[in-house]
Amino acid sequence: MTLSEIESNIAKFTERLSAASSEIVKFESKSRQARFESGNSKTDADALAAEMSAAYSQAVAAFSAGDKAAAASLSSQGRDLEAQVRALNARHAAMKNDCFEYSKGIRNLQQESRTFREEIARLKNVRNTFLNREKKNNDRIVKILNSIPGNTQPTIFIGLESVEVGSTVNSSGSPSPFLVLSAKDFENLSDVNAENLLLFVGQAEKSSTFTDLMVQNDSATRARRRKLFQAMCNIESSSPALKKVLEPLWQGIAFAQELEDGGHSVARHGSTLKDVELIRRLEHGVAPDNVFRPTSASTRFNSFKDWVLTREAVYSAIEDTFVGVDFGKGSVSGPIKYAIHVEYDRPSDDGFVGDVSHKKTIYLPQNIRIKGKGYDKWISVSGITRTMSILKWNGKRWCLAQHCPIGTGWNDSTKSYYPAKTGKVNQLVFSQLPK
């Protein structure tokens, strides 16, 4: 999701909130009018009922006195009043029902308004995070540019905008990772090293941007992407000091891919999450992104690098496992959803698993109709080697809808999974990750 898309969504929900507020005002006005008419109908009905009762009493008295003509006239008058009373009572009941419907409509609109306000607040937080991250990246880029020797002329790519060395760095578009590009041929990425490419590596095709390289999922693009990832891993292996320097790039790639997918994996399982955020989800059902999503295992990736590499492995695993899958097509003719478990040749995750002997029922705050399972106690786990992932077709492209480390079923003593229970389980495949 780009900044302009975020702003557009904020405007859209603000407009919907304004429309809901206008409808509430209309419904409140109609409700007041209905209550007024209901009250008047009741008052008039009570007054006419008293007149009706008096007319019938007088009719009885006249009949007892032998004045049949007067008794008939008063009885007729009583019947006319009785018909008017019934009509007024029916009007009173109809107005009461209208009041109920208006009140129901107001409550529904108020709930919609709360939802819109929450979404607007969430989007504003995303926007602020987006802008803060851009500023930090820009500051970091300027620092890197100042450290580049004069004999190299790299280009910085931020989203869809390229900035030449020496220019003022202003970013626009998607909050994608930045990259120092050299004149090195893209096909020779396996030969790159920290000395000739400085701090960051890579060479995007001239017809593309680094963002495209990270988010397009056709086979050719993913092959180039894997080559870049392997080159980055090679540089980290040859120069351990660069791990800390490269981590912001891995993080930027993760953010770019997550925003393009519209997912929540980084927000709920990112490596920077604190223990207290993971535990809160087990205890109260509130995920790190403040959404009520109870779970039996609250986990995180060891690093943004592992998140990126496991995500890449998921696409390859699904393509290798299911027949006829082509993530590069602009349409689908088969399944629109794939779920898969992938086990890796090295640990990539840790977290906490709920203690099944200390389960409890938890509720969405201020809404006791929505509930789930929580835990009073939990177990710390580490060295997790599997992920559960779901890929979905959103009508335009394939997106990673879910990607999380699997903590359930993990034996922390043996650092392995318990044997799978019988029944339906997701396809399990094995994959090797770059070191």
Image (tube, helix red, strand yellow):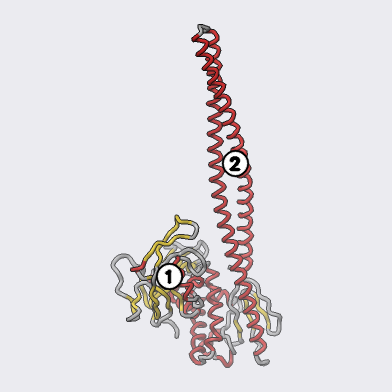
The location of residue 144, given as percent across then percent down, is: 64, 86
208 horizontally vs 419: left or right: right
Q: Which residue is mark 1?
A: 389
Q: In the rendered view of the protein, which quadrant contains the C terminus?
A: bottom left
The quadrant in which residue 419 appears is: bottom left
Q: Which residue is mark 2?
A: 31
The quadrant in which residue 247 appears is: bottom right
The quadrant in which residue 119 appears is: bottom right
**Element type at marker 1?**
strand
The location of residue 96, given as percent across then percent down, is: 54, 37
Q: Hey, what amino acid is under mark 2?
A: Ser
Q: Hey, what amino acid is under mark 1?
A: Ser
The location of residue 95, given as percent across then percent down, is: 56, 36
Q: Is residue 355 above or below residue 414?
A: above
**Which sits in the foreground, 217 or 344?**
344
Q: Are marks 1 and 2 in contact (CB under 8 Å)?
A: no
Q: In the rendered view of the protein, which quadrant contains the N terminus?
A: bottom right
Q: Is residue 140 above or below residue 363?
A: below
> In the displayed image of the protein, which residue is found farthest to the top?
66
**Which sits in the foreground, 273 or 196?**
273
219 horizontally vs 7: left or right: left
Q: Is residue 64 above or below residue 1?
A: above
Residue 326 makes an appearance in the image: no
Residue at image location 50% in from the left, 57% down from the top: 366
274 horizontally vs 343: left or right: right
Determine the CA span between mark 1 and mark 2. 50 Å
**Which sits in the foreground, 351 or 6?**
351
Crowding at mark 1 (Cα within 10 Å: few <14, some 14-19, many 20+): many
**Element type at marker 2?**
helix
**Which sits in the foreground, 166 or 14?**
14
- Give the mark nearest the N terminus, 1 or 2: 2
